[in-house]
Image: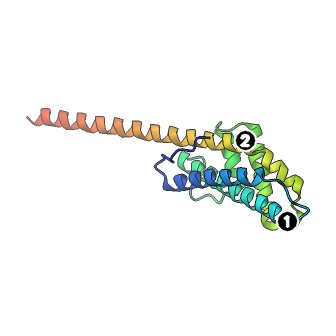
Amino acid sequence: MPHGTCLFRSTACQSILCDIRHYQEDAESIFRRKERFDQDRRDFYARTMVLFALTNRIMDLAREVSLIRGYISTEEQVKNKVFFKRLHDHGVISWEMRQQMIDLVNFRNQVSHHFYEVTRDDIAKVWQTMPVCSEFVSIMEQELASHDRVKKGMVIIAGTALILLVLVLLWYFS
């Protein structure tokens, strides 16, 4: 995933994308370290929390893109899994990615509500999905870029129409 600046107009998306990049870097650093689970549980907690934070921001990104692209409305009360279902329904993500993102929501819920049940295997399984998460973020960036292109195109068309209207009115009244 590119590590450049966040270029999208939505400040919420800019913030989310920048946070995701930071959490991904932190996760890579934490997971590179040698595990010391038998010495203390700090590595387990650090790994769990960085994946939890990353998962939360991925869900935030899915929500923002779904709102911006009109896949959900601001009036809808939508659970986190629904964002990924809607993205799939609109052909943005594949069925497999949808399911993997829903698995992340399940992990996030488990950490939030049943942390005592989280195991090393759970953490390892989520860590193995990080390439899919990076791909998801890239797809969301493409969706945002596509939205920006459409908006720019509409502004150009509206501006051109306004200029033509002014020219026609000037010609008519001259």
* SS state under label 1: loop
Q: Locate residue 103, reporting x and y percent.
A: 79, 50
Q: Quadrant of the C terminus?
A: top left
As displayed, is residue 81 above or below residue 38? above
| Residue visible at 53% across and 43% down in the picture | 144
Q: Quadrant of the N terminus?
A: top right
Lower sequence index among marks 2 and 1: 1
* SS state under label 2: helix
Q: Name the residue tied to disc 1.
A: 41
Which kind of residue does numbered mark 2 sit on?
Val
Q: Name the residue tied to disc 2.
A: 132
Q: Nearer the viewer, residue 21 or 52?
A: 21
The mark lying in front, picked from 2 and 1, is 1
Q: Quadrant of residue 168?
A: top left
Q: Tell me: 150 left or right of 141.
A: left
| Residue visible at 82% across and 53% down in the picture | 34
Q: Say how many tags the image has.
A: 2
Within-10-Å neighbours for mark 1: few <14, some 14–19, many 20+: few
Q: Locate residue 28, reporting x and y percent.
A: 72, 50
Residue found at the very far left of the displayed protein:
174
Q: Quadrant of residue 132?
A: top right
- Label 2 vs label 1: CA separation? 27 Å
Which kind of residue does numbered mark 1 sit on?
Arg
Q: Locate residue 16, reporting x and y percent.
A: 58, 54
Q: Tell me: 50 left or right of 142.
A: right
Within-10-Å neighbours for mark 2: few <14, some 14–19, many 20+: some
| Residue visible at 80% across and 55% down in the picture | 106
Residue found at the very far right of the displayed protein:
38
Q: Tell me: 173 left or right of 32.
A: left
Tag of residue 148 = none
Q: Nearer the viewer, residue 25 or 53?
A: 25
